[in-house]
Image (cartoon, rainbow, N blue to C red):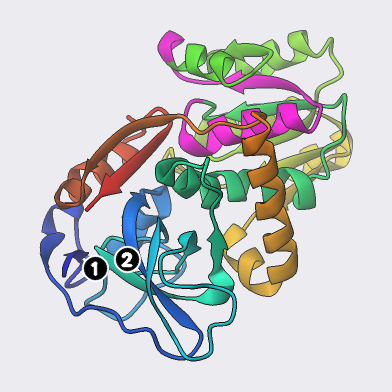
Amino acid sequence: MKAIIARAFAPLDQLLYGDWPEPEAKGDAVVVEAEAIGVNYPDGLLVQGLYQMKPPTPFVPGMEVAGRVAAIGPKVTGLRVGDRVAALTVVNGYAEKVAVSEAMTMKLPDAMDAADACALICGYGTSHHALKQRARLMPGETLCVLGAAGATGVAAVQIGKAMGAKVIGVASSPEKQRIALQAGADIAIGYDNLKDALKEITGGKGVDVGFDPVGGDAFEALARAMGWNGRLLVIGFASGTIPKLAVNLTLVKGFSVVGVYWGDFTVKEPQAYADNMRELVSWYLAGKVKPVIEGIYPLADAANVLKRVLGRGASGKLILKP
């Protein structure tokens, strides 16, 4: 079968589109024939050796796929060949087929598009876990989402609204701010004078929950705009700069900085992860959340698509298709 192969940790240009051994359905694994493959920021870090995890090389990157079950292992109990599923996998996703544990799959309703299903896994899964378990966002609170036009940011905006928050979306251009508003943000602003803008919008009270997948200078501005008992969520560092925190701010402003590592959450708390995914699917079917799919591209174009994601040039979710 065809796959995207990282022979070694190297720049994205060195990814290869070539032949890779077909996976087998062993034990509790199922083989999923991909209809859609999600592209995520950590995928680009992984192939360059810049992520927390470093798999043995060579390897196939990719953590989310949606499609049909092509084969099942002897210990599989709840799936049959032909079932439509979405699957979470640490690696191996950028391929025509992938083997994944039954526990890491989710049956898809007929009404759910395969590309939307991919978006619900990592991007929406991260944002949902961040806002539900880590921030414990409450109705009526003010949520500020940085990078509000990206795949994870759009998810945070929509989930924040579904949870009853007032949402401020922050994005770098008027076009991206429009995307944040279309996703449901009550207000959309840029990064210029961010601290002062947030204080003005909140009437001096400050932000209850800050959602930051960007890092860099924006993190510091958001930290200085946090309100009493606020929760500042550390999602990632799309700016390329890991910020430093003046911890005296947390003392005098009385807010918490909370790390969000969704990948470990899915492993350490599988039941909570499964419950979250069921809630996301129910919200999707009710029209409360709807992924923004910017484009669907051939699997062979994975390197160029990853460059757009890492360069913060994407608005919404990018999908690969075998």
* Residue identifier under label 2: 49
Q: Counting residues from the N terminus, which is met first, the one under dot 2 or under dot 1?
A: 1
Q: Residue at x 58, y 44 (%)?
A: 124
Q: Residue at x 28, y 62 (%)?
A: 47
Tell me if 312 is positioned left or right of 196 in this view. Answer: left
Q: What percent of the width, then of the height, locates residue 175?
A: 41, 11
Res. 236 visible in picture: no
Q: Which residues are magenta?
A: 149-175
Asked where in the image residue 317 lies, by quadrant, the reply is: top left
The percent position of residue 260, horizontal first and vertical second, equals 65, 54
Left or right, residue 62 beside residue 80: left
- Is residue 207 on the magenta stretch? no
* Residue found at x 75% / y 63%: 272
For label 1, the residue is: 9
- From the viewer's perspective, is residue 127 above or below residue 96? above
Residue 148 percent location from the top left of the image: 54, 27
110 sits to left or right of 97: right
* Residue 147 visible in this rendered orientation of the protein: yes
As helix, strand or loop, the secondary structure at mark 2 comes to: loop
Instruction: Please state which of residues 48 and 158 is positioned toward the viewer in this rendering.
Output: 158
- The amino acid on which the numbered mark 2 sits, given as a three-letter code, is Gly
Disc 1 packing (10 Å; few <14; some 14–19; many ≥20): many
Q: Amino acid at mark 1?
A: Phe
For the residues bearing labels 2 and 1, Cβ distance under 8 angstroms: yes
Return the mark for residue 129.
none
For residue 143, what is the image quadrant? top right
* Magenta-drawn stretch contains 157: yes
Secondary structure under tag 1 reads loop
- Say if 112 sits above or below 292 in the image: below
- As drawn, 170 above or below 113: above
Name the residue: 29% across, 79% down: 23
Q: Identify whether 99 is placed above or below 128.
A: below
